[in-house]
Amino acid sequence: MLQNIDNANRDMETLLRHVMEQNSRSVDYQANTGQMEYRTRETGNGKQTAIFLEGQGGEPTRQLDVNGVCFDGIAKTAEIDVRTARRLSDNYPEQWDGLINAIWQQEPKPRLLRTFMDDERTGTARAMLSDRFKTYDNLDLIETAIPELIKANDEDNAGWQLQNWHSTDKKLMARFKSNTIVGEGAKVGDLMALGLLVSNSETGHGSIQVAQINWTLACLNGMQTENKIRSPHLTSSRGDADVWSVLTEEAKKADNAAMSLKLRDMVRAFSSRESFDEILQKMKDAAADVIEGTYTEKAVDKMGSILGIPQKRRSLVLEGLVQTRAQDGYVGEPVSRATLMNAITAVPQMQDAAGNAMIQPDDIDDWQRLGGRVLEMKQSDWTAISRASLEAA
């Protein structure tokens, strides 16, 4: 069944194998910090920190090596700035260990430890999270989304295919592209295809998400539209947390099953031709919004300010603008809101001189969402950007 959604590199098969292997090693421990001890030890590769989790009810004590994501969670739990925590851990490991252990013992808090276990006693602590964290895992997401896309291929000739995927210590992201739901975007020759993103964080670094993407086929830049659903892993109120903490495993599974049904329906809705055509019309409208002046770098700087893009990253948008103006549909055309949207979504594709990606996988979605914000930008913001291009250099 996977053949009709996989690509030539068999990335879908690799993705499923990866998610299933991680799921087989994933073990969660609900524990109080008073049951934990933090230790730093020297190894052949330098210092390694670990949590020793005291066994309860006949369970063995477990040694859990701390990865970078979990370290940040430990610092957050201790209410210490992460940069300060890293400096103390690197330069004063004995004192740092003592400080964390003192906080854990004197200010005990219930925590969820998410781990990958190698055996019964050893593994990796991959996240220290609030006890309010609702677990909805990557396998749950994939098992919900993939059957719907396969069904759409079989019944509607939707042409869904995995475009790319990334898995980091923070997130899983899988992006799909339809080979049949295509159309012209902002200009004649600017061909676009409907796409879909599914993403999740098992470690507290983002919501469960299904979002619509529009792919620019000339360069495979992706823009996220406003058609999206996000569901946080954390309960929204203390009362909800109290309920969640007393739920049985059966009730928690039922809660996740309801979430899967909602995500299934959103996958179906966001993968329709009708929603895609609405976005294509918005692209055409954006192409009609042309900047008034010639100082495009001023327009990019003003747009960066409105969108909250750091100053040092705005040069990447300028580079993306150069690339966009060389694409079909944009050559020789005035700079418009559609042009600037494409300039932003070009950024995740950029590489440095050594061929390394300029944007980390965990940040790609942020840039795709920024592209969507330009498409949906209110008129007053666009007017400010357009007028900025009139300013003298």
Image: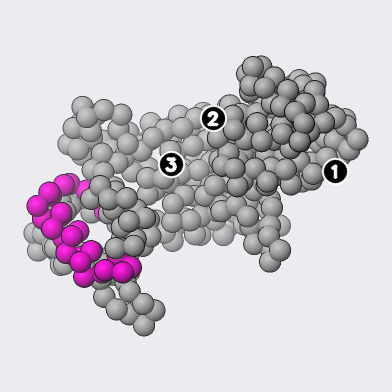
Callout 1 crowding tier (Cα within 10 Å): few <14, some 14–19, many ≥20 = few
Please say whether residue 283 is visible from this viewpoint.
Answer: no
SS under mark 1 = loop
Please say whether residue 55 is visible from this viewpoint.
Answer: yes
Which amino acid does the dot numbered 2 rest on? Lys
Question: Which mark sits nearer the N-terminus, 2 or 3?
Answer: 3
User: How far across and how far down the image is residue 300, in percent?
Assistant: 69, 35
Q: Is residue 224 left or right of residue 208?
A: right
Q: Which residue is mark 2?
A: 228
Q: Distance between the Cα atoms at labels 1 and 3?
A: 35 Å
SS under mark 2 = strand
Q: Residue at x 42, y 59 (%)?
A: 22
Which amino acid does the dot numbered 3 rest on? Gly
Which image quarter is the C terminus in?
A: top right
Callout 3 crowding tier (Cα within 10 Å): few <14, some 14–19, many ≥20 = some
Q: Distance between the Cα atoms at labels 2 and 3?
A: 14 Å
SS under mark 3 = loop
User: How far across and how far down the image is residue 55, in percent?
Assistant: 13, 63
Q: Nearer the viewer, residue 177 or 131?
A: 131
Q: Nearer the viewer, mark 1 or mark 2?
A: 1
Q: Which residue is mark 3?
A: 206
Q: Nearer the viewer, residue 141 or 184?
A: 184
Q: Which residue is mark 1?
A: 326
Which amino acid does the dot numbered 1 rest on? Ala
Q: Is residue 362 left or right of residue 247?
A: right
Question: Which mark sits nearer the N-terminus, 1 or 2?
Answer: 2
Q: Is residue 92 left or right of residue 306?
A: left
Magenta segment boundaries in residue numbering: 89-116
Q: Residue at x 81, y 36 (%)?
A: 191
Q: Distance between the Cα atoms at labels 1 and 2?
A: 30 Å
Q: Nearer the viewer, mark 1 or mark 3?
A: 1
User: How far across and how far down the image is residue 57, in percent?
Assistant: 8, 59
